[in-house]
Each structure stands twice: as structure tokens, then as C-alpha cells.
């Protein structure tokens, strides 16, 4: 585990993007291509913007993402497909973008997505941490053992309140109750994991992740078992961590 604490969210985003680009370029140099897994949400704004300006041959990069709401149209402002198209895909020239589709036949979409995912390992996984300690939409208590790559999950109330707090929905009742999420075991198969976790609202989750033993009630604690995990914080999200004994 490597922890980087930046003074500002903007600096954190730049440092994280540079690290992501480093590993993508390394994979491209070794294999001729790279596979990238991206998180979404307000916490990723600065990193995502900085990543689009990094010197990476994105024509050799295939992008996957972590999750999507069930039955939410891609035109809705909270759609993660819309988010990624506007903030990343439309700003670089990717080899391919493989999206999680929550509309229509969800099980069929999961099967097709899993087949694509299993074609080759993910080189770099950008995995955020939620206010409730979730990774992807694996809310506590998370399932740590499964042979599935993606599954349909039911979102807990704190997760749904986070979506309202970030401005994606007007009320908790507007937030879909289910989503398609990459599973914890699949996340852990990424070659490198980079977590970008800014803002004071994430300080509790960061502290719990670093202080507590690995347990499903703080799903992000599982990341500590990954052999190459890089955690990027800003001054606000690091507050609890800096107070640890």
C-alpha cells in the first residue's frame, strides 16, 4: 500500500492521473495495449480531467467501468455511462469503451460484459471509496467471495443519500434501489489499483479503511490485501488518517 496526501483536490487529481498514466504506458510498452477500469462520481472529477491531458496513446486502451443503475436511461444526468462519455470517452481516442448497461435485459448484459472482461486482465483499476466504505456498489456487508464478475445489488440508504448529496438526484426516493456492480473479487484481480478519495465527507471511510481489519462492513478494507494498491487523498479526506496513532 502506498498513500499520497496532496494539499488540494486539484493536486491530488493531477498526481493520481500521472500515476494511472505511468501504469497504462507501462502496459502498452510491454503488451502493445492496456485495459483500464474507471470509477465515477464527484470524487473523480479532478482526476478524470487531468487524465485526459496525460501523454498516453489511448488508441491502445480499452476502458471498462464499475457499475450502473438498473433501468436508469443513459440520458439521465446520474447515468455513469453519460458521465464517462462526457468526462472521458469523448475527450480521448480510446481503442474501445465497454459500458455497463442497466437498461433492458440486465442478465444478458452482464453475461456479455463478463465475456469481454475475461478476455484479458485489467491492467489498471481506478477504484473509489464511498462514504459508507463501499467499492463499486458493494455496500456493507459486502460479498467477499463469489465467482461472478458483475451482479445486481440493492443499494443501502447511506449510499443513496450520497448520490443525493453529490447532486445527482433531488431526493433519496429518486435514487434507483438497484444497480449492476463489479464484484469485490473481480476488482481485486486488477494488476494495479489506484484509489482517488478526496473531500471531508470521505474522511470517516478513509479512517475506517485504514484502521479496521479487513471486514465486509467496511468493504474498502479488502483493498489492503491487494499487492499494489495506491491511495490518493487530499487534506480533507486525510484528516482522520492523520490523527491515527
Image (spheres, helix red, strand yellow):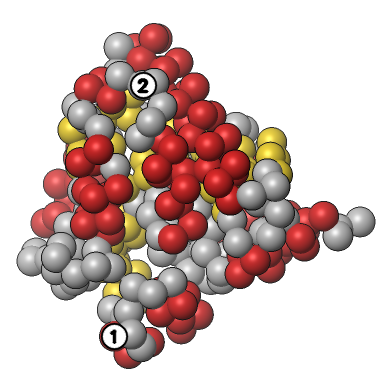
Q: Earlier in the sequence, mark 1 or mark 2?
A: 2
In the drawing, does residue 153 fall left or right of residue 228? left
Residue at 67 percent of width and 59 percent of height = 237
Question: SS class of the residue under badge 1?
Answer: helix
- Residue 91: x and y in percent read 25, 38
In the drawing, does residue 197 fall left or right of residue 77? right
- Residue 32: x and y in percent read 30, 12
In the drawing, does residue 16 fall left or right of residue 94? right
Quote the CA–CA distance across marks 1 and 2.
38 Å
* Residue at which label 1 appears: 174
Mark 2, Cα crowd under 10 Å, few <14 / some 14-19 / many 20+, is some
The C terminus is located in which quarter? bottom right
Q: Which mark is residue 211?
A: none
Identify the image quadrant of residue 107.
bottom left
- Residue 187: x and y in percent read 44, 45
Mark 1, Cα crowd under 10 Å, few <14 / some 14-19 / many 20+, is few
Q: Which mark is residue 56?
A: 2
Looking at the image, residue 33 lies above or below residue 12: above
- Residue 96: x and y in percent read 18, 33
Residue at the right extreme of this rendering: 245
Q: Is residue 228 visible?
A: yes
Amino acid at each position: 500500500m502506498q498513500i499520497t496526501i496532496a494539499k488540494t483536490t486539484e493536486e491530488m487529481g493531477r498526481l493520481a492521473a500521472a500515476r494511472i498514466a505511468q501504469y497504462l504506458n507501462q502496459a502498452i510498452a510491454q503488451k502493445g495495449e492496456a485495459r483500464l477500469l474507471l470509477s465515477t462520481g464527484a470524487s473523480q472529477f479532478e482526476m478524470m480531467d487531468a487524465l485526459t491531458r496525460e501523454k498516453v496513446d489511448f488508441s491502445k486502451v480499452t476502458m471498462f467501468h464499475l457499475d450502473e443503475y438498473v433501468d436508469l436511461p443513459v440520458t439521465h444526468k446520474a447515468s455513469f455511462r453519460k458521465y464517462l462519455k462526457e468526462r472521458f470517452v469523448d475527450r480521448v481516442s480510446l481503442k474501445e469503451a465497454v459500458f455497463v448497461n442497466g437498461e433492458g435485459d440486465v442478465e444478458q448484459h452482464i453475461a456479455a460484459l463478463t465475456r469481454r472482461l475475461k478476455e484479458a486482465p485489467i491492467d489498471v483499476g481506478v477504484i473509489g471509496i464511498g462514504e459508507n466504505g463501499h467499492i463499486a456498489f458493494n455496500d456493507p456487508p459486502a460479498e467477499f467471495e463469489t465467482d461472478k464478475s458483475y451482479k445486481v445489488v440493492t443499494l443501502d440508504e447511506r449510499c443513496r443519500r450520497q448520490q443525493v448529496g453529490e447532486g445527482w438526484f433531488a431526493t433519496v426516493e429518486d435514487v434507483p434501489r438497484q444497480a449492476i456492480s463489479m464484484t469485490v473479487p473481480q476488482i481485486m484481480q486488477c494488476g494495479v489499483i489506484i484509489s482517488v478519495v478526496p473531500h471531508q465527507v470521505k474522511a470517516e471511510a478513509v479512517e475506517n479503511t485504514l484502521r479496521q481489519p479487513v471486514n465486509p462492513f467496511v468493504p474498502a478494507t479488502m483493498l489492503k490485501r491487494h499487492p499494489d494498491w495506491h491511495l490518493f487523498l487530499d487534506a480533507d479526506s486525510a484528516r482522520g488518517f492523520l490523527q491515527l496513532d
